[in-house]
Image (cartoon, helix red, strand yellow):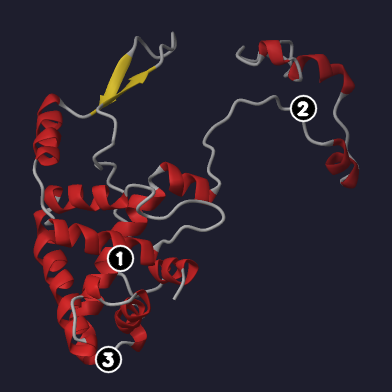
Amino acid sequence: MNRRENLKLLFTGSLASGFLFTGCGPEAPETTEIPHNPQIGEFGSYGRTPEEIIYNEKLKSATFFTEEERKKLDVLVDIIIPADETSGSATDAGVPDFIEFMMKDIPGYQTPMRGGLLWLDHKSDEMFGGKFLDISGEQQIQIIDLIAYPDEAAPENEGGVHFFNMLRNLTATGFFTSEEGFKDLGYVGNKPNAWDGVPEEVLAKHGLQNDPKYKDVYLDISTRGTIAQWDDEGNLIG
C-alpha cells in the first residue's frame, strides 16, 4: 500500500463516518478578530467561549496514550501518510498530537482505539511471534495490508478493519488541517491580486473585446476598494 492508495480509500463507501474536520484540534486558535468594516460594525471576535477555552486546556493537560501506544501510533500514522516529494509525513504534521486530543475530546474513540492497538499486538504475535513494535517494517506492512482494504479483508479481521478505518480517518483529518496538509494540497488561501480583466485571447476567441472607455476605471487598482457607481442609464461612472 502507499500514501495515495490509502487516501483514495477515504473517498469510497468503506468509511461511513466521513471526515471529522471539527476545528477543535489542540492548535486551533482560541479567538479570531474580525476586521472593522464601517458598513457592518465595530471589531468583534469569534471562536471559543471562556468555558470552551478552560475545557480545551483541561484536555491538553491530560494524557491518554501510554508511551508504548504513542510509539505505535507514530508508526501507524506514517504508514498511512508517509513523507513524499510534496510534503512531510503525518508525524511531521503533528497528527499524533491531534489524535491524542481527539481521544480526550470524544471519549467514544478511546475503547476502539485502545482495542485496535491491542489487536495489532495479538495479530503480530500470532503471525510473527512478537509485538507490533518489535517486528520488522515489512512485517508491519503485512499486518496492515490485512486490514487496510475493507473489501478484501477476511471476516476474522473485521475488528482490525474497523479500527484502521477510524485511524485512517483521524490521520487524514489531522494531516489535511495542518500546514503540511495545506502544502500537500497546494492550498494557499485567499491572496490579494490585481485583476486585469478577461484575457484578450479569451475575448478574441469569442469575438469580444473589453470596452476601451472603461479601461481606466475597471483596471485602476488604486480604486479597487471603492464601490462602483452607475448613472441612471446604467453607465459605469466610478
Q: Which residue is mark 1?
A: 76
Of marks 2 and 3, which one's residue comes earlier in the chain? 3
Q: Quadrant of the C terminus?
A: top right
User: Which label was assigned to residue 192?
Assistant: none
Q: Please name whichever residue, 48 or 146, is drawn nearer the observer in this view of the structure.
A: 146
Name the residue: 11% across, 57% down. Answer: 66
Q: Which residue is mark 3?
A: 154
Q: Position of 232 compared to 171: left or right?
A: right
Other-residue count near label 3 (Cα within 10 Å), few / some / many at <14 / 14–19 / ≥20: few
Q: Position of residue 194 (x, y in %)?
A: 70, 24
| One can see residue 196 in this view | yes
Q: Which residue is mark 2?
A: 196
Other-residue count near label 1 (Cα within 10 Å), few / some / many at <14 / 14–19 / ≥20: many
Of marks 1 and 2, which one's residue comes earlier in the chain? 1
Foreground mark, 1 or 2, reads 1
Q: CA distance from mark 1 to mark 2?
A: 48 Å
Q: Amino acid at mark 3?
A: Ala
Q: Position of 2 compared to 74: left or right?
A: right
Q: Amino acid at mark 2?
A: Asp
Foreground mark, 2 or 3, reads 3
Q: Amino acid at mark 1?
A: Leu
